[in-house]
């Protein structure tokens, strides 16, 4: 069936789950690095590098959220289109009896003229 958005919705949910997981892992790694008792230039370098990596992971998580937002917007657009198509179909089906009656009158009129 056209307009079935269940797979897109599932992909959006998976992206949001991945984003949350990534944020959680980034936060945990950052916390472990900051809690490291290594006090030297090398220790500070390690913490600095981990902070940079955490910031990158957070950016990736934001990108996953943006992708999920885009999929959600697409789903809403598809749902709106399906609603419009359904409404147009119902309108056409509702008009069919009147059209049929009008065509019958035209055919009867042509037949009467042809006699």
Image (tube, rainbow, N blue to C red):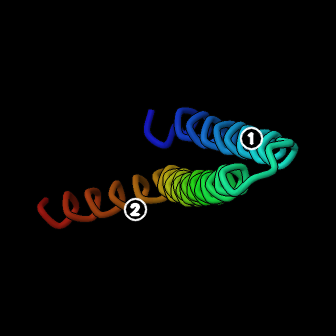
Q: Residue 2 placed where, x, y %?
A: 43, 39
Residue 90 appears in the picture as rendered: no
Residue 74 appears left or right of 29: left
- Residue 33 is left or right of residue 55, and the answer is right
Of labels 1 and 2, earlier in sequence is 1
Query: In the rendered view, would you say 19 is above or below 70?
Result: above
What residue sits right under mark 1 in the picture? Answer: 29
Mark in the foreground, 1 or 2 = 1
Q: Secondary structure at mark 2?
A: helix
The residue under label 2 is 102
Q: Mark 1 touching mark 2, by CB under 8 A? A: no
Check the image and report above or below for 38 versus 98: above
Q: Nearer the viewer, residue 58 or 114?
A: 58
The picture places residue 102, in percent across and down from the top left corner, at: 40, 62
Q: Quadrant of residue 28?
A: top right
Residue 16 position, x and y percent, is: 68, 43
Report the residue at 62% width, 35% height from top.
14
Of helix, strand and loop, which one carries label 1? helix
Number of residue marks: 2
Q: Is residue 102 left or right of residue 57?
A: left
Left/right placement of residue 66 relative to residue 108 reads: right
x and y percentages locating residue 11 in the rendered image: 56, 37
Mark 1 vs mark 2, CA separation in Å: 75 Å
Which sits in the foreground, 20 or 50? 50
Q: Residue at x 73, y 38 (%)?
A: 25
Quadrant where the N terminus is found in the figure: top left
Q: Is residue 66 above or below residue 15?
A: below
Report if residue 39 is visible in the image: yes
- Residue 39 vs 10, above or below: the answer is below
- Quadrant where the C terminus sits is bottom left
């Amino acid at each position: 069936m056209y307009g079935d958005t269940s797979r897109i919705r599932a992909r959006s949910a998976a992206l949001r789950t991945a984003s949350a997981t990534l944020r959680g892992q980034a936060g945990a790694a950052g916390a472990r690095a900051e809690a490291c008792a290594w006090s030297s230039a090398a220790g500070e370098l390690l913490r600095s590098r981990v902070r940079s990596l955490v910031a990158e992971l957070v950016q990736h998580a934001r990108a996953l959220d943006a992708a999920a937002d885009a999929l959600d917007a697409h789903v809403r657009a598809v749902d709106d289109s399906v609603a419009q198509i359904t409404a147009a179909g119902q309108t056409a089906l509702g008009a069919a009896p009147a059209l049929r009656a009008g065509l019958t009158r035209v055919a009867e009129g042509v037949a009467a003229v042809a006699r």
